[in-house]
Image: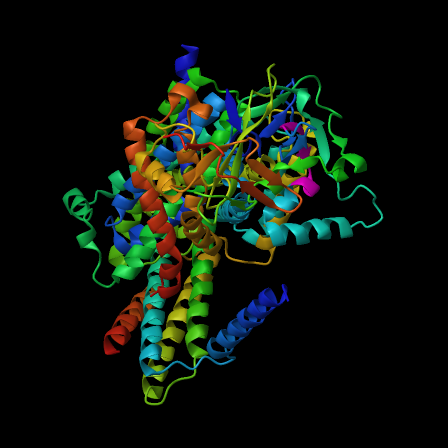
Amino acid sequence: MEWEVPWRRTVVAVGLVLASAGTSCSVVDRPDATDWDTRADQALTDASSEVATSRLALDTAARERTWSSYAVVVLAQAEEAMATVEDDLARLQVPTGRSERAEEVLAVLESAASAVSDARASAVEGELDDDATLGALDEVAAELDRATDGG
Amino acid sequence: MTYDAALHLLDRQIVDEEGRLLAKVDDVELRVDPDGSIRPSGLLVGMPAVLPRLGRRVGHRLTRLHVELRPAAEDRGRPLVVDIDRIASLTSEVRLSGDGRGSLRRLSADRAAAGDRWRLGELLGTPAAGPGLHRKSVVLDVRISGRPGESGEHRVAALVVGPGRSGALLGYDRTSDLGPALIAAVVRWMHRHARVVELGPEVEIDCAAGRVRIGAGASFLPLRG
Amino acid sequence: MKRYFAVLLGVLTAIGGFVDIGDLVTNAQVGARFGWSLVWVVVVGVVGICVFAEMSGRIAAVSHRATFDLVRERLGPRMGFLNLVGSMLVTFLTFIAEIGGVALALQLVSSVHHVLLVPFVAAAVWIVLWRARFSSIENVLGLLGLSLIGFAVALWQLGPDWGDLVAQLSPAEKPGAESWLTYAYFGVALFGAAMTPYEVFFFSSGGVEERWTHKDIGVMRANVFIGFPLGGLLSIAIAGCAAVVFLPQGITVETLGQVGLPVGVALGKIGLAVVVLGFFAATFGAACETGLSVGYSLAQYAGFQWGKYVRVRDAAAFHVVLLVATVLAAGVLLTGVDPIMVTEISVVFSAIALPLTYFPILVVANDPDYVGEHRNGRLANVLGVAYLVIIVLASLAAIPLLVITSMGQG
């Protein structure tokens, strides 16, 4: 008799944990429209941050204010973070009525990711003030801004 | 000169003459003399001493688990012990006389089972009933006269009883000017039903059955402060 | 003369030792997102760590008892055990973050991936804990940690509009894009970074080991009251650099490389190199301190011999704990978990765990049985109780804020 109480409590606790896990952690994340909008905006903000970081890292390296391996590490981490941002949003189930917006946002994120990758590549090659790379970063930063405002 | 066993002795660091850190006072062994007086007789050390103090049910289970981890060992359920007269001084640490290496001995089976040997940990939290006491009162602390390491009489002089958990008085019952004022006020309010009961013929402690009966004639002292 | 030198050395190492991976990352993150509008939290946290460390240092000097001795004596074995588990988990989390921080600092110099560096860093930390004369290592690392002053120089070189920066000091200057909940979340994180519990475990245990007496209280106070606030100024400088360089560009800080970037912008390669050396020294020193603190906590709870000043074989169990903790920490990092994320979690959990050890220290600092005539005065008690309230509020608010803001992202 004495031991039944804790057992019952354990069963209830485990049940609650399983229930909450079942509702919130299914294999595919299916946010509703407003939730999706928030996450898309967050992804765009994060992407802007990574693009600006890459720009700053290239810039300081070009002006010999950092050494090359420092810039490469910062850029490689920006590239990785950028890929995570893009993947995370792409994996969300797009709610109805948002497919156009999703296409637009994911396209911008993809070009941001490739611009950051190019920046990393030119840093590894030692081409720090390559105008094409810097230009691409500036362009994609502007695109990200426009996409954020468009939401 | 008195000290409170739970507040001043229990859980303190045991060191030897050289300052080597030996162990904690995991429990205190009390001995009942034929004349009825109770004296501290030893410091108990080790898992079999500390585990029962982790709560009635949890402590019981953990102690049994500790024994069952090695059922072949005959002494698994008995703690180590240092006799109380090895204590040279009691300050913020319990200093033993001499070299501490090898000073902890396994408590003998006879002594562990003896009916006149109690553990302080068992006595604390024992329900105490009597006229004028709050009905949820338990033994909160044990006030002992004398000081370990000093000559003179060493025996349990009084019990601190009241509702609550042993140790939660935090020493605010001992001196009246212990700060900070806010914490002191809260602790004293929580223990407003606590009393100090002097040991005498009116106080009957039955450790095995787990109860303390206090008669109408017992002398109650208010908590200090 | 020698005595003044010792005081100076103590103060300087306290400055360098104040900043660890938690302060570096959290201050840069907060500066980049909130400018200087959370600086007041750093001030509150620094005063708090001064109050806490002074009390436990005084207890250590007079009664020779370190933090977890007191926790068990005042709270008993059961509450004390829960306390031990909570505090040790937080310290261990910080230990992981510091080892990861050393690896990240080395990665910036070598461009070798930090996971590959972890085993070497962990081995180096363990060798220091096992073999080295710790006081000399502590002094060297503390002094090298002073190179983080580079952040203050960089802030001055960046030539910000000081009037604008000072105007940001008001909480009302919170950037509009951020919600008050994220503001509160980062406030708690910053508080936890400034008041990391291990600092006090380490400080009081060190005092016991160095056999401080009541005569050393003056020197101890000088270290605390001068060293920690100056360390706090470094934290504010880190936030300032991030506020000047990152805030206008909308950059959020997620890597240690970003933390150093403003220094590169302001001072160039040499300045950046000095600051990266500071990263290394601060995190390595903190890794040793947190590792030792894990061992100190357990040993002081259980009562077995601990310490860096006794021979290794006299404190065998203590050294086994250190070895196991180091191996476990390296193991966690080898799973590839991001050390910066571990840092973010550890500072918040530091804030959660603080009341556990703060409360018993506050009680004992008043108890003449322990501290005799050196018990808390009126000022110490007013501050002590005020901080008890602040610490409990921060601790209670931490988990709900963590969940609602999903670690500050929302």
Res. C316 image quadrant: top right
Q: Say if C395 sits above or below B207 in the image.
A: below
The quarter in which the C terminus of chain C is drawn is bottom left
> Residue lying furthest top in this view?
C1
| Quadrant of the snapshot with the N terminus of chain C | top left
From the viewer's perspective, is residue C88 above or below residue C369? Answer: below
Q: Which residues are magenta?
A: B37-49
Inspect this view and state whether residue C225 appears.
yes
Residue A63 seen in the current view: no
Prevalent SS, magenta region: strand
Tell me residue A23's x, y (percent): 47, 79
Tell me: B102 left or right of A4.
Answer: right
Q: Residue furthest right?
A: B72
Left or right of B15? Residue C362 is left
C227 sits to left or right of B57: left
Q: Quadrant of residue C335?
A: bottom right
- Report the colour scheme: rainbow
Residue B76 location in percent, x, y?
A: 78, 43
The residue drawn where x is 30% and y is 68% is A141
